[in-house]
């Protein structure tokens, strides 16, 4: 199946979503900060990125901007999965190239899985 990079600094959420995606047959790579996520996205040839915005070292907006400016990673779909609910945050992420914006508190794990499946078709 697909190779998915999940950039998330909260270990319990990283583990839960990784397990669900792995059960679906996907190869899940994880990164705990923005710098690691950016570097892995360039080295590991991933099919999709799940990206938190509030991250250590380099925030999700910076990661997203760098991904979309790089020829190698600009076409990778990026699903933002965050707790930032402000309209400005949503607009900024989408304008930087995010494919979808999900607020963690508003979605169940199954919804996240469904969104991932839609973007991998």
Image (cartoon, rainbow, N blue to C red):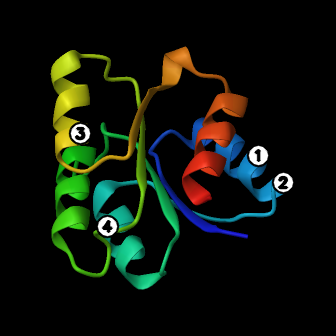
Q: Regarding mark 4 in the picture, which secondary structure is present there?
A: helix
Quadrant including the N terminus: bottom right
Compared across the picture, whether 21 is left or right of 31 comes to: right
Quarter of the image with the C terminus is bottom right
Discs 2/3, front = 3
Task: Tell me whether circle 2 and circle 4 mark residues in contact (CB < 8 Å).
Answer: no
Q: Alpha-carbon distance for marks 2 and 4?
A: 25 Å
Residue 112 coordinates in the image, percent (x, y): 61, 36
- Give left or right: position of 51 versus 118: left
> Which is more foreground, mark 4 or mark 3?
3
Point out the tag, 4 or 3, that comes first from the N-terminus: 4
Quarter of image, res 32: bottom left
- Residue at 53% x, 15% y: name it: 106
- Is tag 4's residue or tag 1's residue first in the polypeptide sequence? 1
95 and 34: which is toward the camera:
95
Above or below residue 81? Residue 85 is above
Q: How many angstroms separate mark 4 from mark 1 (CA)?
A: 23 Å
* Residue behind mark 3: 93
Residue 38: give its label.
Answer: 4
Question: Which residue occupies 36% across, 66% down?
Answer: 36
Of residues 62 and 94, the one drawn nearer to the viewer in this rendering = 94
């Amino acid at each position: 199946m697909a190779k998915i990079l999940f950039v998330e600094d909260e270990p319990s959420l990283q583990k839960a979503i990784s397990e669900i995606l792995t059960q679906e047959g996907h190869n899940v790579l994880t990164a705990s900060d923005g710098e690691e996520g950016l570097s892995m996205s360039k080295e590991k040839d991933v099919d999709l990125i799940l990206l938190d915005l509030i991250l250590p070292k380099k925030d999700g907006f910076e990661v997203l901007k760098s991904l979309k400016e790089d020829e190698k990673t600009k076409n990778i779909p990026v699903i933002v999965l965050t707790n930032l609910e402000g309209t400005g945050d949503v607009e900024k992420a989408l304008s930087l190239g995010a494919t979808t914006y999900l607020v963690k508190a508003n979605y169940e794990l199954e919804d996240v899985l469904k969104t991932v499946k839609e973007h991998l078709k």
